[in-house]
């Protein structure tokens, strides 16, 4: 009981975490001692009603609205698109290597170097200085260089490698979007199933309470036994326990849907649509497999990565080819030298010498890596094997995709038949329960008969809801695994793209 309380308290709701934790605490609290069974049932019902109020306070959303909300909000797409932009800018960086480089420096001295020298002149027989000299020097040599590497054997393969990698990342972005759509659909169907099971169990619970009252009336009239009342009350407690378990199932399903839709923390929604079978899958199995193998992004992404690694292998090997660069430079050298002399009689003289030089040069340079111990060759082999690995991965994906389509189609076919049989079973069980509840008399139709019939009905309801959910999941999976966009999901994704590009 403590573990269940902790699980329920961890579930956020639209009315706040604190309220649900209070409701869970109410459900988990043990009943006061020395109470008869009717009082215990009444107390537990009050707790259940308080806890279940949170289920009725959510906003409703349709499946199409849920898909749109998830595609517009989920950060998984932001992450995938940022990775795509990273590879795109990598290709742009390689393409811009075709542009010339412009640099500026001062290769000879630190700029604007200023030096000052002071000297004194004496006669051999006198200690008095006859003159003092000072020298100042300003020397600068700035240079501007224009450099263009017009021959780089590695550049074109690196550019093609980056473009292929960008194409692969674009395909993986579509994969992320398709996976998100499938996750939203399966979460939505699970929440529909849990909600409708809760409604079925709630109706049966109310019917059982009515049967208890009827059994009590018959008991007062001398019909039936105390054992019937005990059986019905025990069954009522069991149904209340099952309602609490379905409550937990529904809350977990609502949490999962909120997660895929990226709702605000604590916010939950409920389905506005009933759980109904989706339109049938119209394409035959083999045609679906062929379409999936032709369109699935995972195969094309692996092939694009193989192409990228192949070009990168060629780029590594091309390091052994010579590089050629055209260099043009302009350099200005300024040399200003000034000398000042002060005589002992106070006379002062200054001598200034200035020189300026302008030099222009154009040249062609070569760089040839003739031997590096085989490092570039090893890098080339590494990328070549990476290309082979990606080609093999494409083959793996072909078999995986075939298996995915076949399994989903098998589930679709089987669940479609189960829907028909379980629906008939549900109708028959409902009629039996209606007849039993109307004609309960405590003798030939007693508590045991009633309990058996409602258990059959609940089992039929579970089977039908489960088969419809499996059927809808199979249809959604067939859309996903055959690379088709359900509903308006492609348009919703295109609506998200401008916002992703501005990030």
Image (cartoon, rainbow, N blue to C red):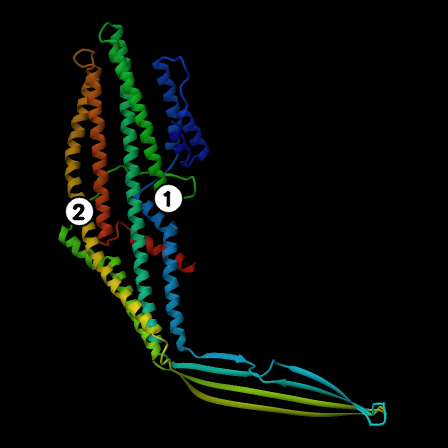
Looking at marks 1 and 2 on the same chain, the residue that comes earlier in the sequence is marked by 1
Q: Indicate the position of residue 174 as horizontal and vertical percent values.
A: 30, 56
Asked if labels 2 and 1 touch by Cβ distance under 8 angstroms, the answer is: no
239 with respect to 406 (left or right): right
Question: Where residue 282 sits in the image (x, y, percent)?
Answer: 16, 49
Which residue does the image show at 28% across and 25% down from the upper left? 203
Q: Which image quadrant for residue 140?
A: bottom right
In this rendering, the answer to whether 155 lies above or below 186 is: below
Q: Helix, strand, or loop for circle 2? A: helix
Q: Residues within 10 Å of mark 2 (few under 14, many from 20)?
A: many
Numbered circle sitting on residue 431: none
Question: At x 16% / y 27%, what residue is drawn?
Answer: 428
Residue at point 40%, 70% (across, down): 93
Q: Position of residue 165 (x, y in %)?
A: 32, 65
* Mark 1 neighbour class, 10 Å CA radius: few under 14, some 14 to 19, many 20 or more: some
Front in this rendered view, residue 310 or 368? 368
Identify the residue under disc 1. 259
Return the residue nearer the eye: 120 or 278. Answer: 120
Tell me the element at label 1.
Answer: helix
Q: Is residue 153 visible?
A: no
Q: Which residue is mark 2?
A: 409
Q: Is residue 315 left or right of residue 469?
A: right
């Amino acid at each position: 009981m403590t573990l269940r309380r902790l699980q329920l308290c961890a579930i956020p709701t639209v009315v706040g975490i604190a309220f649900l934790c209070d409701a869970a605490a109410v459900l988990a609290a043990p009943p006061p001692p020395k109470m008869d069974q009717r009082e215990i049932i009444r107390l537990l019902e009050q707790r259940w009603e308080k806890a279940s109020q949170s289920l009725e306070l959510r906003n409703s959303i349709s499946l199409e609205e849920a898909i749109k909300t998830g595609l517009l909000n989920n950060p998984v797409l932001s992450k995938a698109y940022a990775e795509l932009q990273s590879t795109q800018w990598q290709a742009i960086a390689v393409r811009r290597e075709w542009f010339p480089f412009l640099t500026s420096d001062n290769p000879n001295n630190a700029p604007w170097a200023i030096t000052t020298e002071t000297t004194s002149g004496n006669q051999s027989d006198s200690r008095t200085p006859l003159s003092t000299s000072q020298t100042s020097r300003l020397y600068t040599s700035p240079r501007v260089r224009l450099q263009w590497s017009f021959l780089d054997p590695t550049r074109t393969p690196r550019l093609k490698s980056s473009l292929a990698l960008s194409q692969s990342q674009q395909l993986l972005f579509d994969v992320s979007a398709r996976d998100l759509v499938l996750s939203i659909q399966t979460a939505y169907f699970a929440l529909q199933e849990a909600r409708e099971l809760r409604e079925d169990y709630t109706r049966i619970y109310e019917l059982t309470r009515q049967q208890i009252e009827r059994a009590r009336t018959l008991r007062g009239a001398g019909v039936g036994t105390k054992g019937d009342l005990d059986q019905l009350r025990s069954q009522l407690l069991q149904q209340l326990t099952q309602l609490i378990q379905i409550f937990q199932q529904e809350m977990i399903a609502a949490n999962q849907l909120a997660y895929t839709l990226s709702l605000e923390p604590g916010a939950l929604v409920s389905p506005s649509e009933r759980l109904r079978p989706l339109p049938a899958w119209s394409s035959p199995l083999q045609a679906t497999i062929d379409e999936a193998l032709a369109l699935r992004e995972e195969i094309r992404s692996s092939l694009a990565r193989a192409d990228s690694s192949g070009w990168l292998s060629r780029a590594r090997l091309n390091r052994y080819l010579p590089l050629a660069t055209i260099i043009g430079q302009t350099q200005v050298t300024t040399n200003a030298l000034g000398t000042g002399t002060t005589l002992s009689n106070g006379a002062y003289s200054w001598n200034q010498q200035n020189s300026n030089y302008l030099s222009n040069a154009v040249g062609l340079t070569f760089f040839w890596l003739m031997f590096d111990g085989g490092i570039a060759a090893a890098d080339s082999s590494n990328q070549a094997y990476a290309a082979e690995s990606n080609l093999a991965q494409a083959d793996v994906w072909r078999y995986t995709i075939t298996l995915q389509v076949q399994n989903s189609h098998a589930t679709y076919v089987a669940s479609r038949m189960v829907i028909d049989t379980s629906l008939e079973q549900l109708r028959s069980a409902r009629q039996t329960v209606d007849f039993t509840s109307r004609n309960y008399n405590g003798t030939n139709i007693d508590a045991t008969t009633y309990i058996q019939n409602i258990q059959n009905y609940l089992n039929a309801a579970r089977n039908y809801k489960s088969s419809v959910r499996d059927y809808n999941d199979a249809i959604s999976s067939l859309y996903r695994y055959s690379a088709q966009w359900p509903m308006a999901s492609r348009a919703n994704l295109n609506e998200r793209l401008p916002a992703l590009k501005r990030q």
